[in-house]
Amino acid sequence: MKITVLGAGVVGTAAAYYLAADGHEVTVIERHPAPARGTSQSNAGLVSPGDATAWASPAALRTFLRGLYNHDLGIKVRLRFDPYFLAWSLRFLRQCTVARLRANSQVKLRLALYSRDCINAISADTGIHYDERKKGILYFFRSQHSLDTGTDNYRYLAEHGLPIEIVGRDRLVELEPGLAGVKEKIAGGVYSPIDQTGDSRQFVEKLAAHAAENLGVKFLYGTTVQGLDIEGDTVRAVMTSAGPVAGDAVVISMGPESGLLGRRYGIDLPVYPVKGYTATIPLEDESKGPTMGGADEDQLMAYSRLGNRLRLASTAEFTGFDRTHKPGDFATMFRTARDLFPGAFDEKKAELWAGLRPMMPGSVPVIGQARYKNLYLDTGHGHVGWTMACGSGKFLADLVAGRKPEIDPQGLVYGG
């Protein structure tokens, strides 16, 4: 078939790769001048099945409500008149039960574990490297109380297939010598040995180049999607700033903009943008930086080691489609990083960035056919899009081909 994929982030590019590998003629439409210039440009760098716990939970509900008035938290909610946000919030609140937390986390973990294997298979098959490190990820806690309560979700993931090790501070520093200087400030944590890190932008750029050169994928950069030409139950073409692009099927992988396009055509797609901030800093003294990825669970900051660079990521801000940032937005992030890795970097050399995560209320992406017989979705991956993108792309290719997916499809296939 001739298949048009909307979006050249990590999700859309991975989908295009797998669809083209199946023999389809694939065209990717991207409004930016190159791949991975939106959400995929500068995430935390973590490929993290260990972070498969859904956001919506009883604890998240309390934090969400506190974020309405306390903007020093990792979660910030800017109240504004936005009917779409209000509708999304109500659906999010309905997911904040223990039962939904467990169900959503199981689905995320299943896809995340599969996707990690897909990323590594692509790397092996294509020779793509992306400053990857396969040393695991540490999720650590500052107090005994937060350690005791915070490990519950990880233990649940362990019951469903995630290898973990609960570690005290001595074992933690043995695994990550970069944290030796703050050993006494950390109570302990969780080590997920199969987690890994890497630069998603590098991965997407190289995968797009490989798909174009070896699989014939056509990328239309600098091209804006304006709408869909629909007749009856069929999408005839994608209307773009460069004219119509006709084909046999269309895949929506537009990140946070997916919901905007979908609801114009009656598709129930509650994807809402959640803003995150990252800083990428060259290491002045590599011996003082981390050797693997990690997350300070009390300060709500994640980090990864990308070659000789340190990537910091923090904050979940509900502020619509605003992508702007100012130096003050990174103050807490830098303070935490200086505490963890003193002398490792000069924050004045940081490359600052803010982007939007495409969040579904239950943190589970949507994949599969939607309303029209030749329209597919592969979107809504939230804060672990880098982790789940390749798995969802392969899963989607199986659905398009009519093959039985390699993982259990329950909870993944779109049902809106």
Image (tube, rainbow, N blue to C red):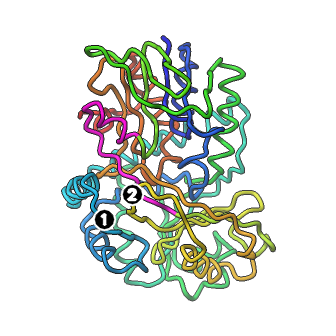
Label 1 or label 2, whichever comes before in sequence order: 1
- Numbered-mark total: 2
Task: Confirm whether residue 322 shows in the render.
Answer: yes
In the figure, residue 298 lies in which quadrant? bottom left
Question: For residue 165: magenta?
Answer: no
114 sits left or right of 293 in the view:
left
Mark 1 to mark 2: distance in Å?
9 Å
SS at mark 2 in the image? loop
Figure quadrant of the C terminus: top left
Q: In the rendered structure, are the residues bearing label 1 and label 2 in contact, judged by CB atoms less than 8 Å apart?
A: yes
Q: Residue at x 53, y 62 (%)?
A: 324
Q: Residue at x 35, y 28 (%)?
A: 368
Q: Nearer the viewer, residue 295 or 224?
A: 224
325 sits left or right of 357 in the view:
right
Say what amino acid the circle numbered 1 marks. Answer: Arg
In the figure, residue 291 lies in which quadrant? bottom right
Q: Nearer the viewer, residue 3 or 57?
A: 3
Q: Position of residue 336 (x, y in %)?
A: 58, 79
Q: Which residue is mark 2?
A: 320
Q: Residue at x 46, y 58 (%)?
A: 322
User: Are there few (<14), some (14-19), or many (20+) residues within 10 Å of tag 2?
Assistant: some
Q: Is residue 249 above or below residue 145?
A: above
- What's the magenta region? 258-276
Say what amino acid the circle numbered 2 marks. Answer: Gly
Q: Position of residue 313 (x, y in %)?
A: 56, 65
Q: Position of residue 230 (x, y in %)?
A: 33, 18
In the figure, residue 239 lies in which quadrant? top left
Q: Which residue is mark 1?
A: 80
Question: For residue 269: magenta?
Answer: yes
Q: Is residue 402 above or below residue 290?
A: above
